[in-house]
Image: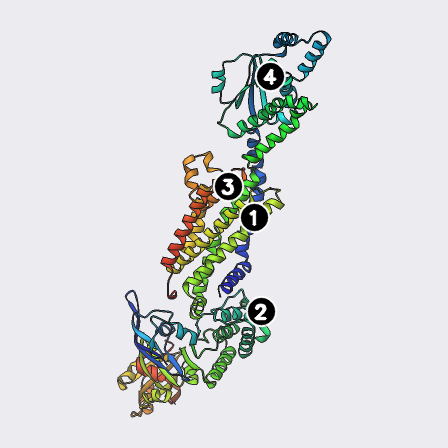
């Protein structure tokens, strides 16, 4: 079991991670969800022993990794957000290098390279130089490089950043397969649908702190009393928004690409009032959707802002 | 694992065009240009300096001594036709005459020794003349004494006196070699005559020229522009290796590949060691290519190869240690600033002081001494010293300077290397 206990990290005067507690049991798939700059990457750097915490501790099988990180490192496969590959080397040369530094050699190494290349769908491009690859192919190889030594825990830091939808779908399917095969996964993302799809347990992080955690269902329960209404109008005026806020003082409001999202208690019956306010404000509502709660709503509920703000 | 790290770094170097151009193409082009452009100036100057000036003070002559020789022969009971025949034989075997007309008059010898003959001169004044490298003083009764010694078994050796000006050891050695050879020839005259051999043959100019060439081989060779600039550019461009390796290492940190390497269980010490060994290996290969280019293309004959090997390995070790240090400092600062300053400032200053562009001692002996404490300057001085033909022992002070710098670089690299990742 991998545990973060009151983990904090401070760079000079700036605290980037504050007293984070995370637990990762064997076979679990855990998501760390949060906007950019929430402290997810620093947290996983501390969890994987690459960055020393300012305070707190990381335990691997109930032993601190502070003095001896080697047992954890052997069990760990880390896929960083960056393309951690050598662009001048071929796909196979990259895998061979990472395999060798992980202690593989000879036929075992060759077999593992072929297995990994097959798994990430790059067997036919194995001799090509990485700098000629597309962004999606590089991402796949980035993942493959962490798998050579058959790690028992895979930590993935935003593995789908900056790639096309097709490659993203391929990667998500691949990761889904890892989870189905029983691999322990810690997955960070600011895409709530990825975390929702892949993870059993989710930690929501904002401004360096874990603000909520639990299963998808448990987290959604936090907003079970809430409802989300998405409004499309011909014109969003300040007066209309002001009148809405006066009418629903407990609700949270967000405007994203001319869509007004209102999160409020289910106990209220808002639609009739909203239409009335719109009419009084000379605003025409072109569509109104009442949505079931999502993790996005959970984050909005907890922080008052969207994940991608 | 160490081999994998080194092999990977080598691949990164080989597959990037910029390092190949700077580490190999540029020095080879510069060696060729500078050797040709400055060859006529450097090589011409050295040529003139090798000719020694010999002053021969002959206080006698055959004409002056003939009367005494005749009296001596008559005293020995030689008269008439036999006397005339012997005088003719002795005159043709006069060692001074042989020295002047045969040994020193040969065209090949004139390249090495310029002779001035004088009858009467103040020896003390002549000795103070810096332009004279040697003075041969032939006493007034030399020829008679020689005849007594060579033909009549008189044990008194017919001595001459030789003064050598040690201000220039090579020129003094050339004169010494030729005159010792000449003396050796006439000192063996009695034995040679007994064996029916001619002393003239022993005192022939061929063996004397060979002696001069042996002296030149054994002492300082001239350093032509080809050797000077091959060595100068070689030591200078080896200093670009650390910045390249440190640059790749910083890229590894920025790309998070370094994190992957650490997570695989590679210790920072092993990683630094791999940079050190790669730097050493690349520097050795680079220098071997430069020296081979000098030999095969410019026709340089490298001498004292064991000494050359030792110097080049030592300098390669220094380049490796410097690679590790610059990598460490870049990891600390997380920028390429250190390598840029090193490439832009340090290499230029070191190369200037070390004499890669021209011999710094020509403008200041002090700067030259300071240059000998730079790693490239020490290496260059060591190589040029043994290429001049000096004894191998001359390189030890330079080697000491290099290894002190190696130790300093390694210690700093160990002290400053970030033990647990390099946080971005």
Q: Residue at x 66, y 28 (%)?
A: B206
- Label 2 marks a residue whose chain is A
Residue B336 percent coordinates (x, y): 42, 57
- Could you say which is closer to the camera, residue A44 or residue B283? B283
Tag 1 subunit: B
Q: Are marks 4 and 3 on the same chain?
A: yes
Q: What colour-coding does the image apply?
A: rainbow
Q: Residues within 10 Å of mark 4 (few under 14, many from 20)?
A: some
Label 1 vs label 4, nearer the camera:
4
User: With respect to residue A291, does B65 lie above or below?
Assistant: above
- Label 2 to label 1: alpha-carbon separation: 33 Å
Residue A282 seen in render: no
Quarter of the view holding residue B176? top right
Residue B392 is marked as 3
Locate residue B413, reporting x and y percent.
39, 56
| Above or below for A87 versus B319 | below
Checking the image for residue A128, the label placed there is 2
Query: Which one is nearer the viewer's eye here, A63 or B327?
Result: A63
Q: Is residue B281 above or below residue B366?
A: below
Tag nearer the camera, 3 or 1: 3
Secondary element at tag 4: loop
2 and 4 marks on the same chain: no
Q: Nearer the viewer, mark 3 or mark 2?
A: 3
Considering depth in this image, is A258 or A94 the residue closer to the camera?
A94
Residue identifier under label 4: B154
Per the image, the residue denoted by label 1 is: B290
The answer to the question of whether label 4 and label 3 lie on touching residues, with beta carbons closer than 8 A, is no
């Amino acid at each position: 079991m991998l545990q973060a206990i009151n983990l904090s990290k401070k760079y000079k005067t700036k605290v980037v991670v504050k007293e984070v507690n995370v637990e990762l049991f064997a076979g679990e798939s855990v998501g760390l969800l949060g906007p950019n700059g929430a402290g997810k990457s620093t947290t996983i750097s501390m969890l994987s022993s690459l960055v020393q915490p300012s305070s707190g501790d990381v335990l691997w099988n109930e032993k601190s990794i502070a003095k001896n990180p080697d047992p954890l490192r052997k069990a760990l496969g880390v896929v960083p957000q960056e393309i951690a590959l050598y662009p001048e080397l071929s796909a196979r040369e990259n895998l061979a290098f990472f395999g060798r530094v992980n202690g593989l050699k000879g036929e075992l190494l060759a077999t593992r390279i072929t297995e990994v290349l097959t798994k990430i769908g790059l067997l036919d491009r194995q001799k090509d130089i990485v700098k000629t690859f597309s962004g999606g192919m590089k991402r796949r190889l980035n993942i493959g490089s962490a798998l050579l030594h058959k790690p028992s825990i895979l930590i993935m830091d935003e593995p789908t950043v900056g790639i096309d939808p097709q490659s993203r779908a391929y990667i998500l399917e691949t990761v889904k397969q890892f989870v189905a095969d029983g691999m322990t996964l810690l997955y960070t993302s600011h895409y709530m649908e990825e975390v929702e799809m892949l993870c059993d347990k989710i930690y929501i992080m904002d401004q360096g702190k874990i603000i909520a955690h639990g299963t998808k269902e448990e987290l959604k329960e936090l907003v079970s009393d809430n409802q989300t209404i998405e409004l499309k109008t011909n014109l969003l005026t300040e007066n209309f928004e002001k009148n809405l806020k006066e009418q629903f003082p407990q609700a949270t409001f967000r405007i994203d690409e001319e869509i007004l999202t209102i999160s409020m208690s289910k106990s209220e019956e808002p639609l009739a009032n909203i239409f009335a306010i719109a009419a009084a404000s000379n605003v025409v509502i072109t569509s109104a959707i009442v949505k079931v709660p999502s993790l996005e709503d959970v984050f909005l509920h907890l922080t008052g802002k969207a994940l991608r703000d | 694992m160490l081999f994998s790290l080194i092999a990977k770094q080598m691949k990164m170097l080989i597959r990037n065009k910029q390092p190949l151009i700077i580490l190999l193409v540029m020095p080879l082009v510069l060696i060729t240009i500078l050797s040709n452009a400055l060859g006529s100036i450097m090589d011409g100057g050295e040529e003139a300096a090798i000719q020694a000036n010999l002053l021969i003070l002959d206080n006698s002559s055959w004409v002056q001594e003939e009367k005494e020789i005749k009296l001596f022969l008559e005293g020995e009971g030689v008269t008439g036709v036999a006397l005339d025949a012997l005088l003719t034989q002795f005159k043709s075997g006069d060692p001074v005459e042989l020295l002047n007309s045969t040994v020193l008059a040969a065209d090949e010898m004139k390249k090495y020794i310029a002779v001035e003959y004088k009858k009467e001169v103040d020896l003390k004044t002549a000795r103070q003349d810096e332009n004279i490298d040697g003075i041969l003083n032939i006493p007034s009764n030399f020829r008679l004494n020689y005849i007594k010694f060579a033909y009549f078994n008189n044990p008194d050796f017919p001595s001459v006196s030789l003064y050598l000006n040690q201000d220039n050891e090579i020129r003094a050695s050339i004169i010494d070699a030729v005159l010792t050879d000449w003396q050796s020839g006439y000192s063996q005259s009695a034995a040679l005559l007994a064996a029916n051999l001619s002393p003239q043959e022993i005192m022939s100019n061929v063996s004397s020229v060979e002696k001069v060439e042996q002296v030149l081989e054994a002492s300082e060779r001239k350093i032509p522009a080809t050797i000077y600039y091959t060595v100068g550019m070689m030591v200078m461009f080896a200093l670009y290796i650390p910045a390249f390796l440190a640059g790749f290492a910083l890229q590894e940190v920025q790309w998070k590949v370094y994190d992957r390497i650490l997570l695989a269980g590679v210790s920072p010490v092993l990683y630094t060691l791999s940079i050190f060994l790669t730097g050493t290996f690349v520097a050795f290969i680079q220098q071997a290519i430069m020296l081979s280019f000098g030999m095969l293309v410019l026709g340089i004959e490298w001498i004292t190869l064991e000494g050359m090997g030792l110097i080049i390995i030592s300098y390669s070790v220094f380049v490796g240690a410097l690679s590790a240090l610059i990598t460490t400092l870049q990891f600390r600062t997380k920028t390429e600033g250190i390598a840029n300053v090193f490439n832009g400032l340090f290499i230029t200053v070191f190369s200037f002081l070390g004499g890669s562009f021209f011999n710094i001692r020509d403008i200041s002996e002090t700067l030259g001494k300071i240059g000998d404490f730079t790693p490239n300057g020490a290496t260059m001085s060591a190589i040029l010293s043994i290429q001049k033909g000096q004894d191998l022992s001359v390189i030890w002070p330079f080697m000491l300077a290099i290894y002190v710098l190696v130790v300093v670089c390694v210690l700093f690299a160990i002290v400053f290397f970030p033990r647990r990742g390099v946080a971005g």
